[in-house]
Image: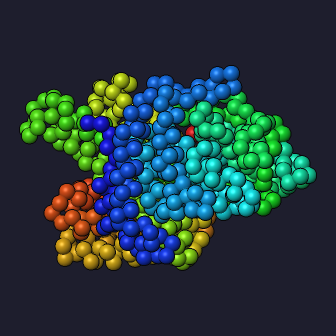
């Protein structure tokens, strides 16, 4: 049973859960009709199934490598990227003025997730370009936009983001890269960056790096950082790649997974670059790219979970062991069935949360309503963290379903677990996402959170007649979460919030998942989605109780043991 993109699941979510119809009612997205949406999903699914999925094992078994300063990508990746580029999938949500389709991020997120499930290591390349496209659209000069955006959108050139340095990981403000004014509108950028996803390749004509660096005399910390666009090749007067710039790949990291994605150590030696955004406004510009990437990385986790689930299901439907009724396979064993249902239910919940986040981004952009912008900001860390946590958990469970064969690399089950593990680390670790949620995203006193909870409870009330037990469970969970939210916002000491931030975020995701499963059940009464919702709400939703107890425990016990006692 080869990989199949979850096109039907996405279409169902568009129609019944995330209210895609509301996007079509806006002037900006009026052309994203039902026919257009379904045609796009069908074509994207076909590309994922027929072109990208066959490359999944190639990337793992034949990693990208660096030879004589040249990055050589995995077999078939050049053709895979060409299919992505020629299909227009990179610029789905980009500005039509520069060759993009101007489609909703909701649709782009769905296609990105399907590509992630097919071949995660390759999908990371267009995701990086998409983030750079959005950053340039918002912050670059008209001249930079006119030159770079068409090339990035069509896939002739690719983009990267360069934040991390050996001494400056999540603490970006500790960077040491510097930039000096050349006096002609350009800057000489010098320094070393690490962990640069798709830092180079052998299939695009140019690689464009967004690099954080500090100008002479700029303040320390994040406030003094500026952002620069540094191409591998300097464009000539016709906008075509010209002389080689002062940028090179020092080495490629030897990683646990994602072997097909070259993760580079980049060296900049007085490389010519152009400032993007305002002087010392680098973090504001880079956050545009990072927020785009955070939703995208959440989708990567969900895509990997979908691939792992399909792989495990295939094995479970073939493997016969022990006494079992029905098909006679291990899928009839209660514990295997529990794992398969948990995988399927959590993939649906995470996918629905991610699309709800993308939908809020689109509605905020189309209406400029603060309510939608606040909701998008609030959901982003949840979508990123829960999507990637789900990816890790489902991939690990997929290995377990395989039993001993899951520990054997030839089956390919372990690859999903190895590949997805980094998604909980990059673009801000999931712990950082949780701290962002309980701190910056609750500077409104919990208003955005409570508006979401109001909606959850209203939908639960509407579902009481059809599904009284499920609706009551979701309503009660929402009330428990509301009380915990009040506790969090009442804490003036940030450490008290941070100590329970991760369980709080997961509890919020659990309740959101119950809400979205209930909406699915209402649209499919008596069908498979109602049955899956019952499983989720009865068996997985109750986790929120323990999580919220943890979230409200404060920080005293965390710091009760001294550092010496930790080491004893």
Q: Please determine whether, in this image, residue 147 is positioned above or below residue 333.
A: below
Numbered circles on residues, count: 0
Q: Position of residue 172 (x, y in %)?
A: 70, 49
Out of 153 and 347, give the one closest to the viewer.
153
Name the residue at the left extreme: 325
Question: Which quadrant of the figure contains the C terminus?
Answer: top right
Quadrant of the image for the N terminus?
A: top left
Q: Farthest residue in the front direction? A: 238
Q: Is residue 287 above or below residue 395?
A: below
Q: Is residue 286 left or right of residue 13?
A: right
Question: Residue 320 location, x and y as percent?
Answer: 15, 29
Residue 250 as seen in the image, left or right of residue 403: right
In this view of the protein, which residue sits in the foreground, 173 or 7?
Answer: 7
- Percent coordinates x, y for residue 60 in the rendering: 46, 28
Q: Give the left or right position of residue 236, taking residue 290 as reference.
A: right
Residue found at x 54% / y 54%: 91
């Amino acid at each position: 049973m080869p990989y199949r993109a979850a096109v039907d699941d996405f279409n169902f979510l568009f129609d019944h859960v995330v209210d895609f119809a509301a996007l079509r009612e806006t002037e900006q997205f009026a052309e994203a009709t039902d026919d257009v949406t379904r045609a796009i999903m069908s074509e994207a699914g076909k590309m994922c199934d027929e072109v990208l999925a066959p490359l999944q094992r190639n990337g793992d078994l034949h990693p990208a490598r660096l030879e004589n300063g040249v990055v050589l990508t995995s077999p078939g990746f050049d053709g895979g990227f060409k299919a992505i580029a020629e299909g227009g999938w990179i610029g789905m949500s980009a500005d039509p003025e520069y060759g993009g389709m101007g489609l909703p991020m909701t649709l782009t997120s769905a296609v990105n997730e399907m590509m992630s499930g097919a071949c995660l290591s390759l999908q990371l390349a267009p995701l990086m370009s998409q983030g750079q496209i959005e950053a340039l659209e918002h912050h670059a000069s008209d001249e930079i936009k006119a030159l770079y955006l068409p090339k990035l959108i069509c896939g002739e050139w690719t983009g990267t983001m360069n934040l991390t340095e050996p001494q400056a990981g999540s603490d970006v403000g500790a960077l040491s890269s510097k930039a000096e004014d050349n006096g002609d509108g350009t800057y000489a950028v010098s320094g070393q960056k690490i962990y640069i996803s798709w830092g180079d390749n052998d299939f695009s004509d140019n690689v464009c790096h967004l690099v954080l660096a500090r100008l002479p005399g700029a303040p320390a910390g994040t406030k003094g950082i500026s952002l620069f666009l540094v191409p591998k090749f300097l464009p000539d007067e016709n906008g075509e790649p010209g002389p080689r710039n002062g940028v090179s790949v020092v080495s490629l990291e030897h990683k646990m997974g994602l072997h097909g994605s070259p993760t580079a150590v980049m060296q900049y030696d007085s490389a010519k670059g152009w400032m993007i955004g305002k002087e010392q406004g680098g973090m504001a510009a880079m956050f545009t790219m990072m927020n785009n990437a955070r939703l995208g990385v959440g989708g990567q986790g969900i895509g990997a979970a979908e691939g792992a689930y399909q792989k495990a299901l295939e094995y479970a439907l073939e493997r016969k062991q022990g006494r079992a009724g029905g098909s006679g396979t291990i899928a009839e064993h209660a514990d295997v069935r529990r794992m398969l249902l948990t995988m399927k239910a959590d993939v649906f919940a995470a996918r629905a949360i991610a699309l709800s986040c993308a939908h809020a981004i689109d509605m905020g952009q189309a209406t400029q309503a603060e309510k939608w912008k606040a909701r998008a900001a609030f959901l982003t860390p949840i979508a990123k963290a829960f999507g990637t946590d789900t990816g890790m958990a489902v991939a690990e469970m997929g290995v377990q379903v395989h039993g001993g064969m899951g520990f054997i690399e030839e089956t390919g089950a372990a690859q999903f677990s190895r590949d997805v593990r980094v998604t909980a680390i990059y673009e801000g670790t999931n712990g950082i996402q949780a701290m962002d949620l309980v701190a910056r995203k609750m500077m409104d006193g919990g208003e955005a959170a409570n508006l979401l909870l109001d909606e959850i409870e209203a939908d639960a009330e509407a579902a009481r007649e059809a599904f009284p037990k499920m609706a009551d469970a979701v309503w009660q969970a929402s009330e428990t979460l509301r009380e915990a939210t009040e506790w969090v916002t009442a804490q003036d000491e940030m450490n008290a919030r941070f100590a329970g931030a991760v369980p709080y975020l997961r509890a919020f995701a659990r309740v959101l998942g119950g809400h979205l499963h209930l909406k699915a059940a209402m649209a499919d009464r008596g069908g498979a989605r109602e049955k899956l919702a019952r499983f989720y709400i009865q068996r997985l939703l109750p986790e929120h109780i323990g999580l919220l107890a943890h979230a409200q425990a404060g920080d005293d016990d965390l710091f009760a043991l001294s550092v010496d006692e930790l080491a004893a």
